Amino acid sequence: MIASSVPGLRRDIAGVSVASLAETYGTPLYAYDAEMIRRRCRDLAAWDTIRFAQKACSNLAVLDLVRREGVLVDAVSTGEIHRALAAGYPAHGPNQPGSDGLPPAHPIVYTADIFDRDSLDAVVKHGIHVNCGSADMIEQLAERMPGASITLRVNPGFGHGHSQKTNTGGEGSKHGIWHEEIPDVLRRAEWAGLQVSGLHMHIGSGTDLAHLAEVAGALERVAIEVGRSLTTVSAGGGLPVPYKPGEVHADLSGYFTLWDATRKRLEDRFGHRIRLEIEPGRYLTAESGFVVTEVRAVKKQGGRKYLLVDAGFNTLARPVLYGSYHPMGLCPQGDDPRETSEEVAVGGPLCESGDIFTQTDGGFVATRSLPVAAVGDLLVIEIAGAYGFVMASNYNSKPLPAEVMIDGGRHRLVRARQTPEDLVRGECV
């Protein structure tokens, strides 16, 4: 490899050549660094239970990897229940045995604001624990699973996130049971014969620890209303990940200390041990993921230069949805060192003006400083392992990309690229 003083070059992912990945699997391509996922799982080892919000990255290989790290799983749909089972999670019973007097943890928890008919059938069939985000779910579950224990997802009346669209608390959010409705919901659960054994709060995705810390106090107040039936409390997710230059990882040890103190006060009040859960999604997988895409055109529009690549918002939707920033690196063909850089906008192939990876919130086109690129070079979009492939689509009848896992210098296909035949399978004229 020829060194270069120009920042923004990216020739390998987890020790594997970007060019070899593109040659083997084609582009666009998702690649995941397995060791990075393991590292992020171990960051949270102080918590009694780490429960992966698989909606962030639900490939079976990722689910299997976190399961082997002792991480349990959250499911928000029938399909995610099926994925968890296919990845080796048991449907019910203590996948993680109780220790030190702690109650056992549920291997899979179904979290939602409604039961659609299929999800209710799946929960009943497999005996899966439910985190109820609406009071109506209580009677619907009781009719099919009398005597079950449940968790309540509570909206504390406030929220925060990296975007207003990822804020899951307060009056502007549909999520959770409104905190002032808890007494009525507890009565409904008692009348229905269900026991409230868990309490969960989640105020938003990609928020900051200052806002997340407010959740502990809110949850403690609601827990006191619920009473001694509680055996598990969940801090929810939302742990921030550094995307932009200058951003750093949060003080997770201080965050755990805050929640551990909350848990201990509740244990003293109730006279029994309480399991303390955290529910990360983005935190476990975001930094592990990369989109590899090929530069297919370089053009000027007035005074602005564009790189057009073969990935679009059908591949990675976060920029068009939230104006999200993703670091980028260029992998030139061969050993060309590319000693100069330039400001460019990066866009995709879709027939949409919003198909721009370098845009800000509101859809305004921005630029990025990258080494001078040519057609045939590869662009690597980084920190794309959360809400990346899972939000991909077939818009413009584009096939879904392949997914690859890199582990110890080896790479393997964990999802085949869709074919044209896959695109029309199930359709008829």
Image (cartoon, helix red, strand yellow):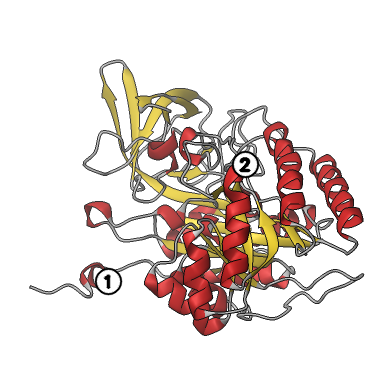
Does any portion of residue 183 appear in the rendered image? yes
Label 2 crowd bin: few (<14), some (14–19), many (20+), radius 10 Å = many
Of all residues, the one furthest to the top in this rendering is 303
Q: Quadrant of residue 6?
A: top right
Residue 417 horizontal/vertical position (percent): 37, 66
Using the image, tell me which numbered label, if any, was put on residue 422.
1
Residue 298 percent location from the top left of the image: 31, 33
Judging depth in this view, the residue of 104 and 397 nearest the camera is 104
Residue closest to the eye, 213 or 298 = 213
Q: Nearer the viewer, mark 2 or mark 1?
A: 2
Residue farthest to the left, as pictured: 429
Q: Quadrant of the C terminus?
A: bottom left
Please name the residue shown 56% across and 55% down the image: 17
**In the image, which disc is placed on residue 175?**
none
Is 87 displayed left or right of 69 in the figure? Answer: left
Which type of secondary structure does the marked residue at label 1 adopt?
helix
Is residue 415 visible in the rendered structure shown here?
Answer: no
Q: Residue at x 72, y 32 (%)?
A: 210
Q: Amino acid at mark 1?
A: Asp
| In this view, 208 is above or below 265 | above
On the image, the x and y values in percent for residue 168 come to 53, 43
**Residue 322 or residue 205, whichever sits in front:** 205
Please name the residue that numbered disc 2 is placed on.
156
Q: Nearer the viewer, residue 231 or 280?
A: 231
Kindly check if marks 2 and 1 are in contact, taking CB atoms under 8 A apart as contact: no
10 Å crowding of disc 1: few (<14), some (14-19), many (20+): few
302 left or right of 228 in image: left
Tell me the kind of residue under disc 2. Answer: Pro
Q: CA distance from mark 2 to mark 1?
A: 44 Å
Q: Earlier in the sequence, mark 2 or mark 1?
A: 2
